[in-house]
Image (cartoon, rainbow, N blue to C red):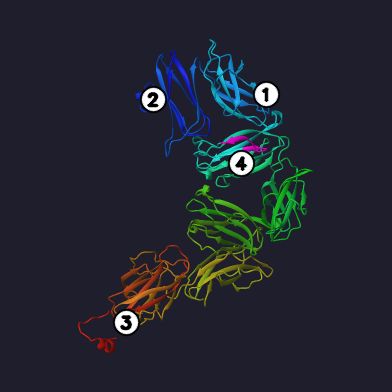
C-alpha cells in the first residue's frame, strides 16, 4: 500500500505497470484507511501485463491510499511492477500507432486531444519502466521519425503533450513495436485472415509470424465481439527471407481456431480450417516473394465433353502461368512426383486429351509452368470415366433428386451405369438445399441399356427420392422413386437410352393387372404403328434383355402370362416389331410379384402342432407379394401385406412363434382368430414374435394372420411359423415319503 498527499487540487494520473509475466493484478485508490477494501475512489485490474492506468481528481492537503492486489485463488501471486503518479496538466495523447517500420527507424503517430503543438517522445527497449525524465521534443504528432534503432529488436515508446505553461501531460504508453530485418523498400504486406468457428474469439490462442526465427508479429485472432466474422491482420514481410507461421498457444478452444495466409498478390498460400493442426507446431513455412506471384497448383479441375476416346480437361489457375503440363493415367496408380516426365504440354486451358480407351476410368493432374525455371506443384487428382460412345451419340438424361426431410441425402448415393460401367454417381441434395430438388444431367450413349443402382443407403434412406427424365422431347418422366420406397443395394430402374427419334418407337405405359399366384396380364401403349410385339418375362433382378434377346411374339395387347411361380418377382419388357428389319428398343422394365399362396384366409397354410415345447416341425412363410385382406383387425401395425396360417389345437394352450425372421424388415405382427374365414373372431394380438395362446378348445381350428408393422410397400421378409405345446403344470401332494421311497419310486 502507498500513501500520497496532494500538494495542489486537480487531477493526477496513476500508472502501475507489471514488469514480468505476472497476471491478475490491479491498483485501487482510497481516501481513508477505513475505506480500504470497502469503497474505492478509482481503480483498474486485468489479467495481462499492460499498464493499469486511471486519472484521479485530488484535493490539496488530502492523503490518498493506493493498494496493489493480486488474485488470491488458489494462492496469492507475487507481482513485480513500477508505480508512477503524475500530475495531469492537460489531456495526454491517445491512439498511439507505428508505421513504416524498417531496420533502424519507424514512424510514430498519435492523436492530440489537448490541442498541443509540442510533445516529448521516449523510445525504449521493450519492458523498460515509464520515463523518469524528459523525452525528445517534436512538433509533429504524425509520422514522427524515430531513428537510430537496431534491426530485429523489440521497442516501446511513450509520448506526452507539452501543455504550454511549463507543464506536461501524463506519459501515454507503452506502445510496443519490433524493428524489421529489412528496410521498408524491401517489404511487402502479407495478410493473415483469422477465423473462429464458434464465434467467441480465440480465447487466449495465439500464433507467431517469424522471419529468420525472429517474431515479426503475434496474431491474437478474432475477439468475442467479432462473432463469426473473419479478422485480417496485415504484416510487413521482408522479400526473399524465409518465414513461418508458428502456433505457439492453443488457447481454451484450439479446435475453433482457423487461419489463412494471402500474399501481396492476393494469392492464398495456406489455409488451416478449424479443427485441424496442433498447437506447439509450425503450420506453414515459405519464402516471402514481393516481386513475383507464387507458382501455385491449379484447383477446381473439370472433365467435360467426355467421349469414348477424348476428354476436355479444365482447371482454375492460381498463379501467373500461361502454360501447363497435364498428366493422365489409369485410375489408382501412384500420383506423379516432381520428377515426372511423362506429361503432355498444355498451352491452353481448357485442353483436349485424345487416344483414350472407351469405358475406362482415368486420373488426371495438372501443374503450372510459370517460367523456364519455375514449375509449380501437381494439383489434386481429378477422376473421370470415358464414355462408351462418341459425343455425337450422347444425350443428357435428367436425374432429379429430392430429400423429404430437407437435410440432404446424408451419405446416400446412387450410381448410373451403362453396360455395367458407372458413368455418374448421384449424391443428392445437400443440407443447404432444404426441400428443393436438385437436377443432375448425365450424358448417356444412344441405344445402350442403362440402370440406376442404389449404391449407398445413407443415414436416412427413407428420405431419398429420385426421378428420371429422358432426353427426347417432351422430356417425359420415365421413372419415379418417391421417398419411403425402394430398397438400398438394388437396381431401381433399367432402360435403354434414346438420343434420336426412332423409326420404330418402343412401347410405353407398360401396366400389370390381374396378378394371381401363377399368372398376370401385361398391357402397353403402342407409340407407333406396329401390330406385332415381342414380350419377354424374366426373374426379378435379371440383366435387361439385349438386342439379340428373344421373347414371345404376339399380336395381342394385353398379353397374359401363365404358369408362373407364386410369391415370385418378375421383370417384363416389350418391344415393337415394325418390320422384319425394323425393331424397337425394349420398353422400360415393369416389375411385379405374383401372389403368395396363403395371401387370403381361405388358403391358409397348415402349421403342424409340436407335441412339446420344441419347434421340430414348422411351416415356411413370406410376405413377399402379399396384399391386404378384408378380415377385421384391431391390432397395431399396417396389415397391407398379410399372410395366413392355421392349426388345430391339441391342448388348451400353445406357444406361437415366428422364427428365422430375415428380410427387409424384422418387425412383424401376428393376430390369432377363431371361427371360419367368413366369420372370424379376433382373440389375441402380438408384436413380439412369440406369444402364448390360452383357453383354446382342443380339436378346434385357429387362424394366424402375419404381416409387417411398417406401411412401406414391397417388404421381402421370410420366416417360419412354429406352434408348440406347453408342458402340463407341476402338481403337488402332501404324501410323506422316506428317502428310499423318493429314490426308488418318485425320482
Element on which disc 2 rests: loop
Q: Quadrant of the C terminus?
A: bottom left
**Mark 3 and mark 4: span between their CA atoms?**
83 Å
Q: For the residue carrying disc 4, how many other residues have a C-alpha within 10 Å: few (<14), some (14-19), or many (20+)? A: many
Tell me the residue that label 2 is attached to: 40
Q: Which residues are magenta?
A: 209-219
Which sits earlier in the primary sequence, circle 2 or circle 1?
2
**Mark 2 and mark 1: span between their CA atoms?**
44 Å
Q: For the residue carrying disc 3, how many other residues have a C-alpha within 10 Å: few (<14), some (14-19), or many (20+)? A: some
In-image side of 643 versus 176 (left or right): left
Which sits earlier in the primary sequence, circle 2 or circle 4?
2
Tell me the residue that label 4 is attached to: 246
Q: For the residue carrying disc 1, how many other residues have a C-alpha within 10 Å: few (<14), some (14-19), or many (20+)? A: few
Tell me the residue that label 3 is attached to: 650
Residue at the spot x=43%, y=38% of the render? 75
Task: Give the percent coordinates (x, y) of residue 346.
Answer: 76, 48
Task: Tell me the number on the disc at residue 304.
Answer: none
Question: Which image quarter: residue 677?
Answer: bottom left
Element on which disc 4 rests: strand
Tell me the residue that label 1 is attached to: 148
**Mark 1 and mark 4: span between their CA atoms?**
30 Å
Amino acid at each position: 500500500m502507498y500513501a500520497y498527499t496532494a500538494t495542489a487540487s486537480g487531477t493526477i494520473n496513476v500508472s502501475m505497470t507489471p514488469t514480468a509475466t505476472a497476471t491478475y493484478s490491479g491498483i485501487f485508490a482510497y481516501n481513508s484507511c477505513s475505506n480500504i477494501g470497502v469503497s474505492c475512489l478509482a481503480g483498474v485490474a486485468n489479467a495481462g501485463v499492460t499498464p493499469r492506468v486511471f486519472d484521479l481528481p485530488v484535493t490539496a492537503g488530502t492523503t490518498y491510499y493506493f493498494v496493489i492486489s493480486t488474485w488470491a485463488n488458489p494462492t496469492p501471486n507475487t507481482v513485480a511492477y513500477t508505480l508512477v503518479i503524475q500530475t495531469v496538466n492537460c489531456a495526454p495523447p491517445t491512439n498511439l500507432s507505428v508505421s513504416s517500420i524498417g531496420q533502424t527507424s519507424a514512424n510514430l503517430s498519435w492523436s492530440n486531444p489537448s490541442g498541443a503543438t509540442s510533445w516529448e517522445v521516449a523510445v525504449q527497449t521493450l519492458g523498460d519502466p515509464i520515463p523518469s525524465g524528459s523525452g525528445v521534443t517534436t512538433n509533429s504528432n504524425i509520422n514522427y521519425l524515430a531513428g537510430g534503432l537496431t534491426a530485429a529488436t523489440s521497442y516501446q515508446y511513450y509520448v506526452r503533450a507539452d501543455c504550454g505553461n511549463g507543464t506536461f501531460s501524463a506519459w501515454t504508453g507503452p506502445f510496443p513495436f519490433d524493428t524489421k530485418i529489412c528496410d521498408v523498400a524491401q517489404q511487402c504486406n502479407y495478410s493473415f485472415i483469422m477465423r473462429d468457428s464458434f464465434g467467441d474469439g480465440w480465447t487466449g490462442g495465439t500464433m507467431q509470424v517469424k522471419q529468420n526465427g525472429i517474431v515479426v508479429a503475434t496474431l491474437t485472432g478474432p475477439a468475442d465481439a467479432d462473432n463469426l466474422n473473419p479478422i485480417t491482420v496485415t504484416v510487413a514481410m521482408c522479400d526473399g527471407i524465409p518465414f513461418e507461421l508458428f502456433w505457439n498457444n492453443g488457447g481454451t478452444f484450439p479446435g475453433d481456431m482457423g487461419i489463412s495466409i494471402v500474399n501481396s498478390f492476393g494469392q492464398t498460400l495456406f489455409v488451416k480450417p478449424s479443427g485441424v493442426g496442433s498447437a506447439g507446431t509450425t503450420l506453414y513455412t515459405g519464402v516471402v516473394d514481393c516481386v513475383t506471384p507464387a507458382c501455385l497448383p491449379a484447383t477446381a479441375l473439370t472433365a467435360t465433353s467426355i467421349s469414348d476416346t477424348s476428354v476436355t480437361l479444365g482447371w482454375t489457375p492460381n498463379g501467373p502461368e500461361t502454360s501447363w503440363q497435364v498428366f493422365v493415367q489409369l485410375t489408382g496408380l501412384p500420383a506423379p512426383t516432381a520428377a515426372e516426365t511423362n506429361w503432355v504440354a498444355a498451352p491452353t486451358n481448357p485442353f483436349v486429351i485424345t487416344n483414350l480407351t472407351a469405358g475406362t476410368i482415368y486420373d488426371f493432374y495438372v501443374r503450372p509452368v510459370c517460367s523456364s525455371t519455375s514449375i509449380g506443384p501437381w494439383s489434386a487428382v481429378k477422376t473421370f470415366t470415358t464414355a462408351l460412345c462418341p459425343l455425337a451419340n450422347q444425350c443428357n438424361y435428367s436425374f432429379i433428386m429430392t430429400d423429404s426431410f430437407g437435410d440432404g441425402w446424408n451419405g446416400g448415393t446412387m450410381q448410373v451405369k451403362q453396360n455395367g460401367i458407372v458413368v455418374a454417381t448421384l449424391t443428392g441434395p445437400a443440407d443447404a438445399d432444404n426441400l428443393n430438388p436438385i437436377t443432375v444431367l448425365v450424358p448417356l450413349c444412344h441405344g445402350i441399356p442403362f440402370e440406376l443402382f442404389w449404391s449407398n443407403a445413407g443415414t436416412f434412406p427413407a428420405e431419398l427420392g429420385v426421378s428420371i427424365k429422358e432426353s427426347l422431347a417432351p422430356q417425359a418422366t420415365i421413372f419415379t422413386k418417391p421417398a419411403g420406397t425402394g430398397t438400398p443395394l438394388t437396381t431401381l430402374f433399367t432402360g435403354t437410352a434414346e438420343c434420336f427419334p426412332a423409326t420404330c418407337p418402343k412401347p410405353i405405359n407398360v401396366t400389370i393387372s390381374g396378378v394371381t399366384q401363377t399368372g398376370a396380364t401385361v398391357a402397353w401403349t403402342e407409340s407407333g404403328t406396329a401390330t406385332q410385339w415381342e414380350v419377354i418375362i424374366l426373374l426379378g433382378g435379371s440383366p435387361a434383355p439385349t438386342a439379340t434377346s428373344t421373347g414371345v411374339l404376339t399380336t395381342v395387347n394385353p398379353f397374359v402370362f401363365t404358369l408362373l411361380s407364386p410369391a415370385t418377382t418378375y421383370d417384363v419388357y416389350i418391344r415393337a416389331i415394325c418390320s422384319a428389319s425394323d425393331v424397337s428398343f425394349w420398353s422400360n422394365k415393369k416389375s411385379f410379384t405374383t401372389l403368395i399362396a396363403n395371401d387370403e384366409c381361405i388358403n391358409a397354410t397348415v402349421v403342424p402342432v409340436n407335441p412339446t415345447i420344441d419347434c421340430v416341425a414348422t411351416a415356411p412363410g413370406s410376405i413377399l407379394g402379399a396384399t391386404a385382406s378384408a378380415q377385421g383387425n384391431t391390432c397395431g401395425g399396417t396389415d397391407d401385406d398379410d399372410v395366413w396360417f392355421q392349426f388345430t389345437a391339441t391342448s388348451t394352450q400353445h406357444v406361437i412363434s415366428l422364427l428365422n425372421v430375415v428380410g427387409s424388415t424384422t418387425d412383424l405382427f401376428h393376430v390369432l382368430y377363431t371361427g371360419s374365414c367368413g366369420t372370424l373372431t379376433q382373440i389375441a394380438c402380438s408384436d413380439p414374435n412369440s406369444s402364448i395362446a390360452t383357453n383354446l378348445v382342443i380339436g378346434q381350428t385357429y387362424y394366424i394372420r402375419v404381416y409387417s408393422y411398417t406401411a412401406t410397400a414391397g417388404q421381402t421378409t421370410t420366416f417360419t411359423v412354429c406352434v408348440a405345446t406347453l408342458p402340463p403344470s407341476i402338481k403337488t401332494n402332501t404324501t410323506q415319503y422316506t428317502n428310499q421311497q423318493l429314490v426308488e419310486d418318485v425320482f
